[in-house]
Amino acid sequence: EYSANVNFFPAYNGGPGNDKGNVPPVPGAMKDWVIELLQHDTDLKQFEIWNEYEIYPTGFWQGTPEHMARCMREGREAIQQVRPSVRLLWPGMVNWDYSNPTQPFSNWIELGMASDGAGGQARDHVNGFGHHLYPSPGVNTVGLATYLRKVQVSMDQLGKGSQPKYMT
């Protein structure tokens, strides 16, 4: 069993060599792409929509939280149509805030509450949380424990506290 990260595909990234995201995303493109992916990869059990979404507007994603929420909705619609057992994970987000373990990651809350353009929110479409932590100077077991606690607090605030977590 493995996870995939769904990003950098033609309908969104503006063509070969462009990893910044086509803004705004082409309506329906994510759904079409995920349908095709699921039809060709029958072993895929879970995947993330995009990677390190929160590093915007300078990173891999240059859309808005609402654009990402729409991508997440389209991914969920594709899953329901092709293989409902597949788990859609929160976009693989990384955060370097190892302070105050009782406070959620504000960028997670911003995305989770974003409108998906169809009456829902981004948080409505995930049933697992992908996240990752890069080793860096000063990150020890206390820093890791703080980070993981903040992941849980963020999930709790989004009403998803019982969902599984995947360090991707």
Image (cartoon, rainbow, N blue to C red):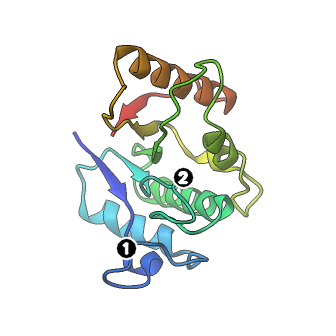
For the point 68% across and 28% down, which residue is it?
157
Q: Quadrant of residue 160?
A: top right
| Residue furthest front in the image | 137
For the point 70% across and 50% down, which residue is it?
121
Find residue 155 and report its horizontal and vertical position in percent.
Answer: 59, 29
Tell me: residue 44, above or below residue 27.
Answer: above
> Can residue 162 be spotted in the picture?
no
Q: Given the image, on which type of amino acid does mark 2 rest?
A: Glu
Query: Quick check: marks 2 and 1 in contact, CB under 8 Å?
Result: no
Find residue 111 and report its horizontal and vertical position in percent.
Answer: 64, 49
Give the left or right position of residue 77, taking residue 7 as reference. right
For the point 37% across and 33% down, which residue is it?
166
Find residue 150 and report its horizontal and vertical position in percent.
Answer: 55, 25
Tell me: residue 22, above or below residue 50.
Answer: below
Q: Which residue is mark 1?
A: 9
Helix, strand or loop under label 1: loop
> Can residue 41 be spotted in the picture?
yes
Mark 2 crowdedness (10 Å alpha carbons): few <14, some 14-19, many ≥20:
many
Q: Which residue is mark 2?
A: 54
Tell me: residue 70, above or below residue 87.
Answer: below
Q: Given the image, on which type of amino acid does mark 1 rest?
A: Phe
